[in-house]
Image: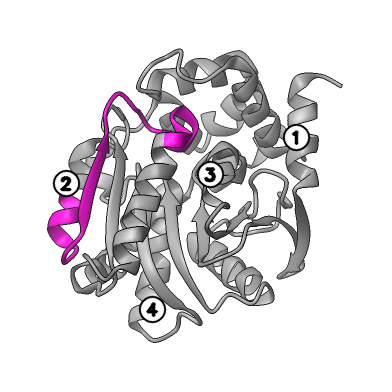
Amino acid sequence: MNSADAAVARWRSRGKFLRSRGFNVFVVDEGEGPCVLVLHGFPTSGYDFSAALSDLRARHRVIVVDMIGYGLSDKPEAFSYSLEAQADVLLDVWSQLGVTRAHLVAHDMGTSVACALLARRERAALPFELSSVTFTNGSVFIEMARLTPSQKLLRNNTLGPIFASLGSRVVFGLQLRRIFGRADSVPSEELDAMWAMLCHNDGRKRLPAIIRYIDERYERAPQWLAPLARLDVPSLALWGERDPVSIVAIAERLVREIPGAQLVKLEGVGHYPMVEDPARFSAALEGFWSRVSSGAR
């Protein structure tokens, strides 16, 4: 067994599968205390939070779910891959796990799932209480994002499937290192594991389908973004300031639009703060939650 397969096996051993909407959904549920729900990004998986989880679970119950099409969860051909559909699955899984109140932490594509959930909350359709929400390096305001060449290719109806089929670990690693704050901040073995999670269960074939979330960001912007200006829970934009994709100006706009929102910039960190510097990422979250629990905004 190579190092990537071993990492996948270790991660698999920490979680379990639940059935939702006819699919197998992989869930890691660790720790005790106030609940934290984690939303990962594209094109990787909940494994991105594996290192940070070691710190966060010391004081919290942390639930990490691989969305449909990602990580170890099912990657069916017959699925819409709409972020609203992903939200339906997540809500079902969290209900099965008995979640009644939680902090929400969202990264990358997961920040738009978070916006969809917040819109439901405004309609009194979120079945649990929200303690806080943290956005981290996501293109909430999609018109401000600087998409990578790979994202642009995958969105092309003709070239997307070809590019996905030709993808390789070498190209994947080069792309990720380009969006890290420092190219050498993450060991190659960790990138091997992230690539293995992506490829698991024919995951590469689903990339052109799941990247349609970018179109959905444009289409649903009015419904998803308007509630941010009325959000009445403690909110944090926790941002790797050297992100060339979800630029720090997105975070700055978030804190202008969300009442009372806080901004924490992680110097020297890029698009994947929980992977690049998990200790600093976890400490920033813990500091925020400590202020929330003390009543400070």
If you read the primary sequence from the N terminus, does the residue marked by circle 4 or circle 3 appear first?
3
Q: Nearer the viewer, mark 4 or mark 3?
A: 3
Does the magenta-highlighted stretch encompass residue 191? no
Farthest residue to the left: give it.
Answer: 256
Is there CB contact under 8 Å for labels 4 and 3? no
Look at 71% across and 70% down and name the residue there.
21
- The residue under label 3 is 55
If you read the primary sequence from the N terminus, does the residue marked by circle 3 or circle 1 appear first?
1
Query: Label 3 to label 2, Cα distance in Å?
Result: 27 Å
Q: Secondary structure at mark 4?
A: helix
Name the foreground residue: 168 vs 178. 178
Name the foreground residue: 177 vs 286. 286
Is there CB contact under 8 Å for labels 4 and 2? no
Name the foreground residue: 252 vs 278. 278
Query: Label 1 to label 4, Cα distance in Å?
Result: 35 Å
Return the x and y of residue 82 as percentages of the image width and height.
Answer: 52, 59
Name the amino acid, label 4. Arg
Return the x and y of residue 32 as percentages of the image width and height.
Answer: 61, 63
Look at 61% across and 29% down and name the residue there.
164
If you read the primary sequence from the N terminus, does the residue marked by circle 1 or circle 4 appear first?
1
Look at 52% across and 49% down and name the residue there.
56
Whether residue 113 can be seen here: no
Name the amino acid, label 1. Val
Is there CB contact under 8 Å for labels 1 and 2? no
188 lies left or right of 126: right
- The residue under label 2 is 252
Name the amino acid, label 3. Asp
Query: Label 3 to label 1, Cα distance in Å?
Result: 20 Å
- The residue under label 4 is 121
Vertical order, 226 against 177 (above or below): below
151 lies left or right of 88: left
